[in-house]
Image (cartoon, helix red, strand yellow):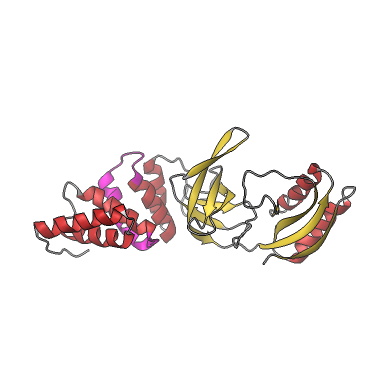
Amino acid sequence: MSRVQLSGAEAMELLQRGEDAADIQDWPVVAACYEEFLTAFPDTPISAELWFDAALANKFLRNWPKAYELGRQAALRAGAAQGHPAWWNLGIAATMVGDWGTAREAWTTYGVPLTPGEGEIEDGFGSALVRLDPGGEAEVVWVRRICPTRARVLSVPYGRRRFGEIVVHDGAPTGERLVEDHAFPVFDELALWQASTAATWRAQVTAPEPLDLTALAGAFEDRGLAMEPVDIAGDADGGALAGARDVLLAAPDEQTATAILAEWAVAGAGRAWHAIHAKA
């Protein structure tokens, strides 16, 4: 940023406009006002907070290079204070721009333990739920977290999204789901990190017993794929029922899906499948 000259009155007006815009979540105005102020006054007693707010506004705008640039300044002024949100937001922005060294520094400074190493982070951070496209379809799916901000989709989404996608999610949970008395956090998606090669197929199956449907799910999981009964797809709390029903299948092609279905069908009495097609 190149320095600009602002009078005291102009600086106060910028701050007020920024605060008013933040109240109504007008993030472009927030970012513009605070960035202009900071070019003139980078290190006033209130500047550290404004660096953070400006970086946060750009995160909400999905302007990752700018969120990264401003986030570095915010983290610098936060010091090594463990748990400071400036470091978490920098970790997200650094991940999005592919600066893995800075991402690792940000997570460890925040207080997240990482397996020692260099480059892209892919570790085990447990299961959680992510709300895909929170401003649109807002479908909640199961994920396996592979770093503090990225996760691989384990469900077969009912909407336009795909099993196996890697998504970037926000750091603050926006809810939780109770499953067998265990609470799992629900995070909002920020961005699609990596698309999936798995297509989604829809088929009709007959599963006489609940365990038959469980076996079908296991047959797909054993191959790194997935199955969801249609009436519970999109509901991460759902449970499988037995009988004739439609299912969603994640598989790279129809041949793979039908091979798994056929193998499952012959392994149990009364099992059957038919009418497979690509999900619209």
Is residue 19 visible in the rendered structure shown here?
yes
Q: Where is residue 259? Give x, y as percent.
A: 81, 60
Residue 201 vs residue 269: left or right? left
Which of the 4 image quarters holds residue 38?
bottom left
Residue 40 is situated, as x and y percent measured from the top left of the image, at 16, 59
Q: Total marks drawn?
A: 0
Residue 30 place in picture, x, y as percent: 28, 58
Dividing the image into 4 quarters, which one contains the C terminus? Answer: bottom right
Residue at the image point whose x is 73% and y is 53% from the top: 220
Magenta region: which residues? 61-85
Q: Nearer the viewer, residue 165 or 209?
A: 209
> Is 221 covered by the magenta stretch?
no
Residue that sits furthest to the right in the current view: 269
Quarter placement of the N terminus = bottom left
Judge by depth and name the residue closer to the eye, 259 or 202: 202
Residue at the farthest top position: 181
Does residue 33 appear left or right of residue 188 in this picture? Answer: left
Say if residue 120 shows up in the picture. Answer: no
Magenta: main secondary structure equals helix
Task: Name which residue lies at 69% across and 51% down.
Answer: 231
| 9 sits left or right of 265 in the view | left
Spot occupied by residue 150 in the image (x, y as percentages of width and height):
50, 52
* Residue 117 falls left or right of residue 231: left
Q: Is residue 68 magenta?
A: yes
- Looking at the image, residue 207 lies above or below residue 178: below
Q: Residue at the location (73% across, 55% down)?
A: 247
